[in-house]
Image (tube, rainbow, N blue to C red):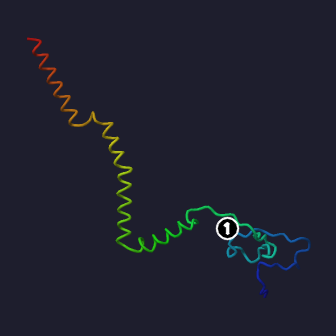
Amino acid sequence: KNTKNHFTVPYTFFAQKMVYGKIFFNNIKEYTPTWFRTIPYQQTQKQTIGYKAPVPGYGTNPQMKRFLRWFQTNVQKNVFAYQMFIFTNVFVLYHIIFVPVVGLYKMNNTHRTLDYAIAQEKAYKKSQESAEGSDE
C-alpha cells in the first residue's frame, strides 16, 4: 500500500508531462479524491516577503480596538449596563426616526383632525345663519 501523501504523485505512470487539476470544492483538500492529481505544495506560489499593504477596516485602528475591548469587558459582560445600552439606543433611534415621521404625518394631515372638522362645522353654521338672515 502506498503510504505517501496523496498530494505528491509519482512520475511513473505519466510518460510526458505532469498535468494537475484544481482542488475540488472551494480549495478544501478533504473533498478532493486521493486518486485526483493535484499540484504539490512545493510548486505552489508562495506569498512574497516584503511590504504588506495596510488593511483598512473597522477594527484595525488601535484606538477602536481599545474602545471595543473596553466595551466588551465593561458593558457587554455587565448585564444591567448592556440592557441600559440597548434601551438608550432604542430610545435615541425612536426619537431620531419615528418622531419626525409622525410629526410630518400630522403636519400633512391637519385637514383630517377633529379640531379642523369642528372649525369647518362652525363656519358652515355661521354661513347658514347669515344666509337665513339675508333671506328674511
Residue 34, percent from left and from top = 74, 78
Residue furthest left in the image: 136
Residue located 49% across and 69% down the image? 68
According to the picture, the residue beneath numbered tag 1 turns out to be 26
Between 66 and 94, the residue placed more toward the observer is 66
Image quadrant where one finds the C terminus: top left
Residue 3 left/right relative to 114? right
Between 73 and 40, the residue placed more toward the observer is 73
Residue 5 left/right relative to 125? right
Amino acid identity at mark 1: Asn
Image quadrant where one finds the N terminus: bottom right
Between 37 and 117, the residue placed more toward the observer is 117
Does residue 111 sit above or below 65 in this rendering?
above
Residue located 35% across and 62% down the image? 87
Mark 1 residue element: helix
Residue 4, percent from left and from top = 78, 85
Residue 58, percent from left and from top = 55, 62
Q: Quadrant of the rendered structure where residue 121 is?
A: top left
Residue 117 left/right relative to 15? left
Residue 20, percent from left and from top = 81, 70
